[in-house]
Amino acid sequence: MTIEFLTEDKQGKNLHLEHLEDEIINFGVKGGRASIEFLRSLRDMLSGASRSSVNMTVKWDGAPAVFAGIDPADNKFFVAKKSVFNVTPKLYKTNADVDADTSGDLNTKLKVALKEFSKLGIKGVLQGDLMFTKDSVENDTIDGVKYYTFQPNTIVYAVPVDSDLGKIIKSANIGVVWHTTYSGKELQDMKASFGVNISSLTKSSKVWMDDASYKDTSGKSTFTAKETEAVTSLLSKTGVAFKKINVPTLNKFLRLQESLSGKFAKVTIKTYNNKFVRQGVPITNPSKHAQGYLKYVTDQFDDETKKIKTPAKKQEYETRKTEYVREFKKQIPTLIQVFTMQKYLVEAKILIVKKLNSIKQLTDTFVKTSDGFKVTNPEGYVAIDRISGNAVKLVDRMEFSFNNFTAIKNWDK
């Protein structure tokens, strides 16, 4: 399976991964076809087919994203945030550099990262999610089990105190999950490859690190015949909807979407869909969902028009709304097929995610609520094509969105 579209940014940096079901909106027919091929390969992998060309990693809910490595300009070690690849990058090579640009908790974490990651012998540049520093690890008892817990973002990660991993966590000053490797002669020209070979790094008792790879030590992640059949059926329905999409009309719609910018950027289909994700409402009626998008477009234009005071500008906005709504109405049949495809694609994806969730990973995962700790699944997974190196997110967005809105965060305490 060869995927030709980019899931990184235009410069080949892994600064943002897209959800599988959004690829039809991001890249048109090419993205839609690739998303189906991704799920077919995952089905084959979970069905025990050895020919699957997909690697799987666990998506850790860490924060902040951290970069570490050697600056090719002077061969000095640095840590950085996402500004590492800016034209004028912000690299922290000394504590003074960290002090000059950050403060508070972030300042403390970056200083620990600078000190401890410099001992790992990193070649090139690595990207990872910061999971904890020693000051953020807590002791909690959950259902009678004593855990070391850390909560970098929404999910609480828990490791039994008396486990081998618990002993490692206790001695570590910092924890990180590395997931992307960068190579190149200059920072701005570096290209991302998903995955990190942590076996090549120098081990340090003060650093707990993992490579994010999906680990099935139980051997139980293989689909049953019935589970394989269920996913195959949904993928078949996805394919039928995909073939019904009018390609010229879809391309015209996507060009129209690209023209929406500034105040009207929130009129896009992805923003519309995300509203339902946040509410925990899946697409069940594609036709109704498509008609709802027309009303959404109208409402968004009306909201912006109300903010305008000059009659001429108001008329400009009204004219623009009329033109957009007229064009979108023409594309309703195509949108219905796009939403139908997304509906079945998400349903197939959820079956795969649930199977992946059934295998316990390195840590237990919880969310902290007003009623105590509640068991939850990992944030999700990243599927990586071994041939092209491209990747997409596999996330149960309804569950994670619900957790994100209801969980008690560290900054809520």
Image (tube, grey):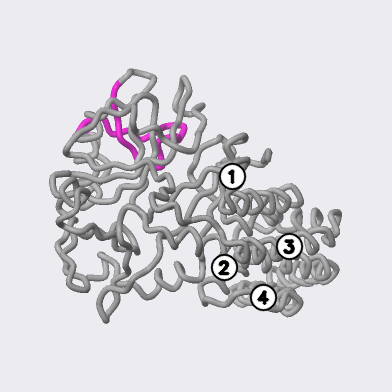
The span from disc 4 to disc 1 (Cα, nearest Å) is 28 Å
Q: Which residue is mark 1?
A: 7
Q: Which residue is mark 2?
A: 274
Q: Which mark is residue 296?
A: 4
- The residue at the point 61 percent across, 54 percent down is 43
Callout 3: helix, strand or loop? Answer: helix
Which is closer to the viewer, label 1 or label 3? 3
Pair 4/1: label in front: 1
Foreground residue among 62 and 306: 62
Q: Position of residue 33 (x, y in %)?
A: 73, 50
Judged by depth in the image, the label closer to the viewer, 4 or 3, is 3
At x 39% / y 20%, what residue is drawn?
Answer: 72
What label does residue 364 carry, if any? none
Query: Mark 1 and 3 residues: CB-CB less than 8 Å, in contact?
Result: no
The answer to whether residue 43 is left or right of residue 206 is right
Q: Position of residue 330 (x, y in %)?
A: 85, 68
Foreground residue, 192 or 95?
192
SS label for mark 4: helix
Mark sitting earlier along the chain (2/4) = 2
Residue 4 location, quadrant? top right
- Alpha-carbon distance for marks 4 and 3? 25 Å
129 in relation to 322, above or below? above
Dot 1 or dot 3: first in sequence order is: 1
